[in-house]
Image (cartoon, rainbow, N blue to C red):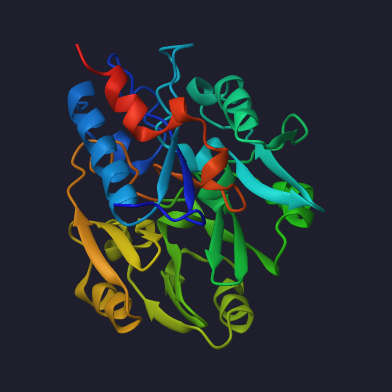
Amino acid sequence: MRTSSNAPVFLVSPPRRDWTIRGKANVFAAAAEAPPSAEAARADWLTVCEAIEGAGGVCAVVDNDVDGMLTGLPYCAEAGLCGTDGATLVFVLPNLTPPHRQAEPKVIGPAVGRLGLTTRALPKGVAFEGQGDVIRLGDRVVCTAGVGRWARTSPEAYSHYRDLLGMPSLALTFHADPWFHGNTFLGGYARGADVVVIVCDEALADDGVARLRAFADGAKFVSITAAQTLTYATNALQVGDTVLAPEGVPDVVIDAWRALGLRVQLLALPALFRKGGGAAVCLTNRLDGVAVEAVPDDMRLRAWRARQAP
């Protein structure tokens, strides 16, 4: 399909041919009895990328040819956060919690630089895992931090990036067990001025439920249970008027997307989701403000495919 010049651009990073699950730093990976094969993981990744481009988006591919230990790179939501400082597009690099992921910025930094983004770093010791904990609800954004076993982003991080968001924001804390990022229990979907918020109230700490509903006043809320969050209904990625969702999401969520006027495309992701712990949102990092023309030819998905030929 022909790509619009204002199409959304998503940063993605393919599993290497020697990829495996290494850190088991989430509830899915920890429970996996056997790791998926690299071949299966690469097939899942390509399924997501082709669906993005089929829905009118563009993938900017970051090849990891630096370090085979960086097996978390395909979960690109944690690669950082795209924002603005005046007229300057910036990319806030992460301070990742799992030890095997902490060197990822040495790959991500140069890649986003090629897209015209200026990189920023948070102070050392401030845990921050990017878009995994920054969730758009239409023209607003909720920034989350976990407290508990699987916590990955610290509450302190918000003060270091909130001025780069360019829209009203709200900071919330959540129970980090079994949830480990905000996008595992909270998702926002919009069409025009209409917004649907999918949320598991059980995940939010303190008075978070009341604060969230007041902040997103006017949105339609769909509540899901803790068990339903394990379908990753909130990890479904909106690309234009299409939602790319993992198979198995509850009917109540699908009905809400369709009532909003969105097309729903279900994706089978047995390796990177069911065993690795991340669906379409986790596998991408949306680069708002980056023009399609800024993506170099060698970072396009078609160029990556060509490089895989024997």
Q: Nearer the viewer, residue 293 or 30?
A: 293
Q: Is residue 129 above or below residue 239?
A: above
Q: Can the viewer see residue 165?
A: yes
Residue appearing at x 51%, y 46% in the figure: 292
Q: Check the image and name the residue furthest to the front.
A: 2
Count of marks overlaid on the render: 0
Residue appearing at x 36%, y 68% in the figure: 241
Q: Quadrant of residue 35?
A: top left
Give percent across and percent down for residue 291.
57, 48
> Is residue 133 toward the left or the right of residue 157 in the image?
left
> Is residue 144 toward the left or the right of residue 271 in the image?
right
> Is residue 43 toward the left or the right of residue 194 in the image?
left
Q: Quadrant of residue 123?
A: top right
Q: Can the viewer see residue 37?
A: no
Q: Check the image and name the residue furthest to the bottom.
A: 218
Give percent across and percent down for residue 75.
42, 37
Q: Nearer the viewer, residue 163 or 36?
A: 163
Give percent across and percent down for residue 116.
66, 36
